[in-house]
Amino acid sequence: MGAGKSSIGRKLAKRLGVPFVDTDQRIVAAHGPIAELFAERGEPAFRAIERSVVADALAGGGVVALGGGAVLDPGTRDDLASCTVVLLTVDEAAVAARLENSRRPLLVDGLASWRRIADERAALYADLADVVVDTSRRPMAHLVEELAERLASEEVGS
């Protein structure tokens, strides 16, 4: 959360000339605000919706920005095994500013919630990542260019 997945993903897709899908935006468009989904239907119902949206998005190719909890689903992790996965990291100081006044349903305790969630998911993220880029302090244009170059290199799988 707060690493810049949507912003960087959109710009990277444009730079690469491929489609961009933000799975959270697709969920909101089809089902309403995520915070309301959590409040009214609970996290398990949200995760089921998310799983379906993510599977469709990944099947379509291009750059896909996943919500941070999407990797909690084993099926999503299996789907990601055939994709190049970019992990965008952000340090605590940078994320504090980015999440100020956030209405994200899992951040009830603000930065403490972010810290707990980041710690809980760190191993999953690391296992899935083919490329890791820290977004804390570098200009977005530099991050996008670095990612485009790294994804074009032979070091990264398809």
Image: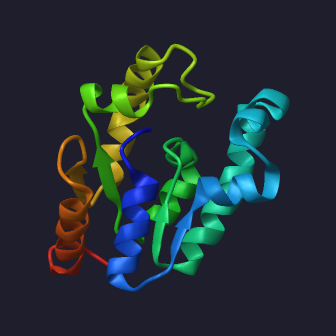
Taking depth in this image into account, of 6 and 124 the one nearest to the observer is 6
User: Can I make out residue 81 in this image?
Assistant: no
Image side of residue 90 versus residue 106, left or right:
left
* Snapshot quadrant of residue 156: bottom left
Specify the quadrant that holds the N terminus.
top left
Taking depth in this image into account, of 34 and 116 the one nearest to the observer is 34
Specify the quadrant that holds the C terminus.
bottom left
Q: How many labels, in total?
A: 0
Taking depth in this image into account, of 45 and 124 the one nearest to the observer is 45
Q: Which residue is at 15% across, 81% downward?
A: 154
Q: Which residue is at 75% across, 58% downward?
A: 29
Q: Which residue is at 20% across, 70% downward?
A: 145
Q: Which residue is at 39% across, 78% downward?
A: 14
**Colour convention:** rainbow
What is the x, y in percent for residue 9?
Answer: 41, 64
Image side of residue 76 versus residue 44, left or right:
left
* Snapshot quadrant of residue 12: bottom left
Residue 21, placed above or below residue 138: below
What is the x, y in percent for residue 34?
Answer: 70, 41
Farthest residue, direction bottom = 17
What is the x, y in percent for residue 146?
Answer: 17, 67
User: Can I make out residue 138 in this image?
Assistant: yes
* Snapshot quadrant of residue 152: bottom left
